[in-house]
Amino acid sequence: MFIINQSRMQKIKYSIPNFLCVLSILILLQSCSSNETKTADAPEKYVLPDSLLKTITIDSVRNLDYSNTITLTGQVDYDEDHVVKIYPMVSGIAESVQGVLGNYVNKGDVLAVLRSSDVTGYSSDLVNAESNYQIAKRNEEKTISMYKSGLASQVDSVNAVQQFIQAKSDLEKSKRILQNNGGSSTGEYVLRAPISGFVVERNINDGMAVRADNSSNLFTISDLNTVWVMANVYESNISYVKNGDSVNITTLSYPGKIFRGKIDKIMNVLDPDSRVMKVRIVMNNPGYLLKPQMFASVSVDYSENKKYLAVPSSSLVFADNQNYVLIYNSPSDIVIVPVQVIGTKGNNTFISGNVQEGQHIIATEALLIYQQLNS
């Protein structure tokens, strides 16, 4: 049996409350330290810095008419309203061909000179007509004088006048024929440019025999200030194309350059072989960039009479196979919202998702802010 001293028991009795008090303080301090550690470990909410806020663009979600695009194949062609094919009016031998393929010529410039027996005949006919005219004129004057003197009958006088009128008519005819065939009295037929433009086709060389009954043209001259782009529309796309539609035209020769125009004529018939309908776009051609026979890609905008929400294309962020926009409420309240892309037109992208018309979105530096929000 243990015998405990009474005074020692008294000391233990008074030390227990002190110990409990110290223990409670230690537990409280430990709890505070734990809370502080948890608070320090928790990430801070992202707040858009003022310096960045001043440089970005805040746009809004809009409800716009949705338009789509179809792409057609096409080809640059001559403007048929400003092109002339030149055919031989006479037969002959080409002596001097001056019209060079691709060269620009002015109206009236000499394209070729032909040595032609036809022109020689026209020149001879003119000489004979002039001689007959002089003879008929003198006979008319003489007969009228004799008629006034009573030495010729009225019938003789009338016949002389008629012969003179006929001779005059034959002379005018011979002059016009020769003039229409070059006007040369030396047997040369001079072929001149009827309009100003480029020589885009040439089917004649020096020494070549030319026949007037040949169906081939000798030259083609075109004013390339305007050209036509003829586009092919397949049956499945006919309902999307109409007069006045805006088009964007691109070519292999000028990558990245867009030529803009409008459809001004629909042919309304299908080619029986290719099963396509032709549409025409008349294009101004400054600098003669568009050359006939160039292949062209023609993009036609058409409206579907529908409205969709649209945002600037620069506001979209693509990450983890998903598109997002950043809804801006305040510098400390930016929400990442997933969206689905319907289509893109120009600088606008049509979308669907949990967004509403009029909501503010971050239109520039969206990817940078998206990364900050997810860091």
Image (cartoon, rainbow, N blue to C red):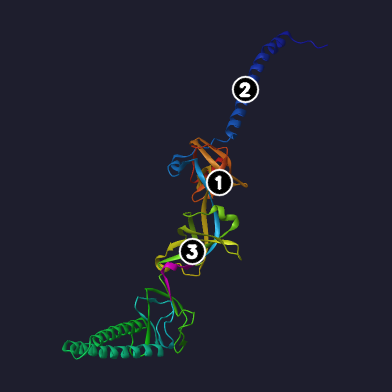
Sequence order check, earlier mark of 1 and 2:
2
Sequence order check, earlier mark of 2 and 3:
2
Depicted 264 relative to depicted 166: above or below = above
Depicted 213 relative to depicted 272: above or below = below
- Quarter of image, res 81: bottom left
Label 1 to label 3: alpha-carbon separation: 38 Å
Residue 345 screen position, x and y as percent: 51, 50
In the displayed structure, does residue 139 sit left or right of residue 95?
Answer: left
Quarter of the figure with the N terminus: top right
Question: Which residue is the site of mark 3?
Answer: 229
Amino acid of disc 3: Val
Question: Which residue is the site of mark 2?
Answer: 28
Label 2 to label 3: alpha-carbon separation: 86 Å
Amino acid of disc 1: Val
In the displayed structure, does residue 148 sit left or right of residue 45?
Answer: left
Which region shows up in magenta?
76-85
Question: Which residue is the site of mark 1?
Answer: 317
On whether residue 195 falls in the magenta region, the answer is no
Q: Residue at x 62, y 25 (%)?
A: 31
Majority secondary structure in the magenta region: strand
Q: Secondary structure at mark 1?
A: strand
Quarter of the figure with the C terminus: top right
Residue 290 screen position, x and y as percent: 46, 67
Q: Tell me, yes or no, if residue 367 can be seen here.
A: no
